[in-house]
Image: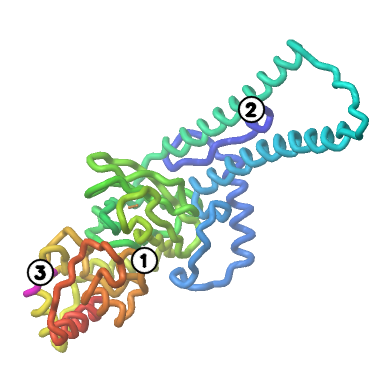
Amino acid sequence: MSAARSRRPPRAPGGERAPRLARCAARAILAGLWLGATAAHAQARVETPSIFRPASTPAFAIRELSWLVLGIAGAIFVLVAGVLVVSLVRFRDRGGGGAEPAQVYGSPRIELAWTLVPFLIVVVLFLTTARYIFALESARPGAAALRVRVIGHQWWWEIDYPDLGVVTANELHVPVSDPPGSVPTFLTLESADVIHSFWVPQLAGKLDLIPNARNQLWIDPQRPGTYVGQCAEFCGVQHAGMLLRVIAHPKAEFAAWVDAQRAPAVAEPAVAAGRRAFESAACVSCHTVRGTAANGIFGPDLTHLMSRSTLAAGVAPNERDRLRRWVEDPDAIKPGALMPAMRLSPEDLDRVVAYLATLR
Ligand code: CUA
């Protein structure tokens, strides 16, 4: 119980509760990680998606709670297994059919103990968890916060920055929040079709994206890097092919990314034939390329397609030959994908892919 009292929920941006243990733990872990870290580029380092390697305040809170629960459960396991092993060894049948051991019926002391102790354990776990949940949920986006809408689709993520005029897909770029909570990213989670679930284990707990509802989640990655996650709610045949990446950039690098994303699509004369072929195909009814006739919203925005590192929501690397295969026959890369094969002639396929490959 003293453990519960000494624990303080994590600091939430705009929240009221004071941080103590979470912040200290965060600092200690960050210090350790910084010591071991190299000055690798943010994009280059993809972290193992483990809840035991948190990088954001809500994830630090989850790890703290996990250790508490694991500690209590581990102690119970050791106690029960220990008593069991001692009993098995000490009171084993040594032959000779010994007498039946003393039988205990209706001992108020024993019954009280095995009712009260589990009850108190559940109370401690409940109260501690509730405090963490309220602390995290009391967060409100301040002036420095970045707001992002994340919309789940079968089977990809639409990522919209309403204040920045940027729309992208499957890769959520955010600024690093150092010190913790200084530049949090507040996500509004929505769905265009069925229930999906946003889960990036190193940054926050998972939260569903529900049709006709809006859920809120916040993250504040405290070191640059690429954090991988995935849809965590079965949403159809390509549920497993609905991966996402969160890329945390140092502030200046993030500003440069925003500038690049805001720029209109490049229009290289060398691939004008490909652009015409693209614009005259049905691609334009699902995809947007800003500054062209393509303004569909059913599929990902392709204005800066080649700035993304994967295709088809993380299913394949975004390389020229994979892109060609994807446009030629999406089913070959992602069976069941809702993008149809356009049945372009080989010449048009080459032209369209050559055009798409310029969309940096
Ligand atoms: Cu989206 Cu599972």
- Residues at marks 3 and 2, CA–CA distance in whole angstroms: 60 Å
Q: Earlier in the sequence, mark 1 or mark 3?
A: 3
Q: Decide: is 260 above or below 28.
A: below
The span shown in magenta is 280-284
Q: Which residue is mark 1?
A: 314
Image quadrant occupied by the C terminus: bottom left
Left or right of residue 250, residue 315 in this image: left
The figure's colour scheme reads rainbow
Circle count: 3
Res. 268 image quadrant: bottom left
- Residues at marks 1 and 2, CA–CA distance in whole angstroms: 42 Å
Q: Which residue is mark 3?
A: 282
Left or right of residue 60, residue 254 in this image: left
Q: Which residue is mark 2?
A: 121
Position of residue 33 measured from the top left corner of the image (x, y, whole percent)? 60, 61
Q: Could you classify mark 3 by the number of other residues whose Cα lies within 10 Å: few (under 14), some (14-19), or many (20 or more)?
A: some
Q: Amino acid at mark 2?
A: Ile
User: Which residue lies at the image location 17% right of the left edge and 58% below the top edge?
Assistant: 298
